[in-house]
Image (cartoon, rainbow, N blue to C red):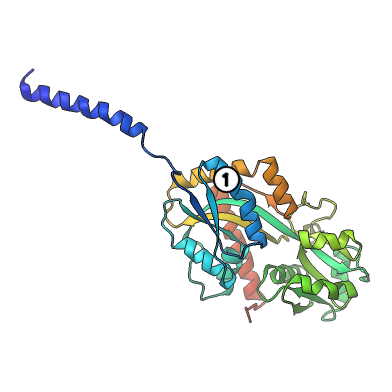
Amino acid sequence: MNKPHLLALLTGLFLVVSAGPTAAQAPTYPTKPIRLIVPFPAGGATDLFARSVSQKLSERLGQSVVVDNKPGAGGTLGADLGAKAAADGYTLVLTTTSTHSIGPNLNPRIPYDAVRDFTPISHLGNAPSIMLVPNSSPAKTVKEWIELARQNPGRLNYASSGNGTIVHLTAELFKSQANVFVLHIPYRGTALAIPDLVSGKLDVIFDSLPSALPHVKDGRLRALGVTSAKRTPLAPEYPPIAEVLPGYESVTWFGIFGPRGLSPELVARINTAANQVLKDPETIDRLTRLGIEPVGGTPAQFTTMLASESAKWKKIIQERKITLD
């Protein structure tokens, strides 16, 4: 073997040997804390949800997942920050129905595209609501309430937590599928409406399970049905409204997104960790107390759900001519 060939062979061997340890020592995600943007204030339902899963997610990923509250503009501010972050897996955003299913269809000035500007990672959970009526209502079931509304068009009313909120749209979806005419009375939150419902000034409200069930258990209000597609383990004694109105479903969903362009490898890593967390008994217990059903699944399943939810609320918003004013 001549000198040039020997030199080339030795050089090649050196590169192979030296590449082995370097490749083995290459850093793997994550190597530093992960920022989880929550587009709503501390202490709210979305914040409590985020904190219920972030600790366990930290354990699964091997790095701290730090909740960063960025409230403002109904969740738009924080969601937009998440959309504009670097697609390196170190900034994620926990969003809900309002930021990705309702908001984009209700507010034409929203600063991001809910589909184009994000990478869906994991559908974490669903929070169904429950249909409440005063004890003085003659209706004992969902079917009876619909019959009552049809017999009294425009004479019954419902409360919401404001125009364009999930409480408002849940009722409008019900009205659309039940084909009833019921007046809308917006409040600055469902807690302010409950006393008027108890007194009989209001006829119905679709409230979240955690805030609604204590009034039912105390005997102050009557629950007719839940808004989940099937019976929920959070309140198994109440039938789904879908038994009377097939296909009816309204839940607040929670999910993790990354910015546009997040690699499939990072998506898979975070999704796997999230699915493991959602099977953890302690996490399940925490979410149950918040009125949230763990979901999980693949990014593809999450993407399909998002498209379905957006189409559903877009149809209701347009049909019912719902605006933020």
User: Which image quarter holds the C terminus?
Assistant: bottom right
> What residue sits right under mark 1 in the picture?
57
Residue 158 in percent (x, y) is at 79, 74
Seen as rendered, the residue at the extreme top is 1
User: As rendered, which of 59 and 293 lies closer to the eye?
Assistant: 59
Q: Residue at x 76, y 78 (%)?
A: 184
x and y percentages locating residue 53 in the rendered image: 62, 49
Left or right: 23 as drawn, with respect to 279: left
Point out residue 203 in the picture as x, y percentages from the top left corner: 85, 74
Tell me: residue 305, above or below residue 314.
Answer: above
Q: Name the residue rendered at 54%, 69% in the picture.
A: 76
- Name which residue lies at 61% across and 54% down: 50
- Can you say which quadrant of the picture contains the N terminus? top left
Q: Can residue 53 be seen?
A: yes
Residue 312, image quadrant: bottom right
Q: Is residue 89 above or below residue 74?
A: above
Count the labels in the image. Answer: 1
Secondary-structure class at tag 1: helix
Taking 61 as reference, is 249 above or below it?
below
State the residue in front, 155 or 201: 201
Residue type pointed to by label 1 = Leu
- Crowding at mark 1 (Cα within 10 Å: few <14, some 14-19, many 20+): many
Decide: is 268 above or below 169. above
Rendered residue at 56%/75% (across/down): 107
Quarter-wise, where is residue 251 in the image? bottom right
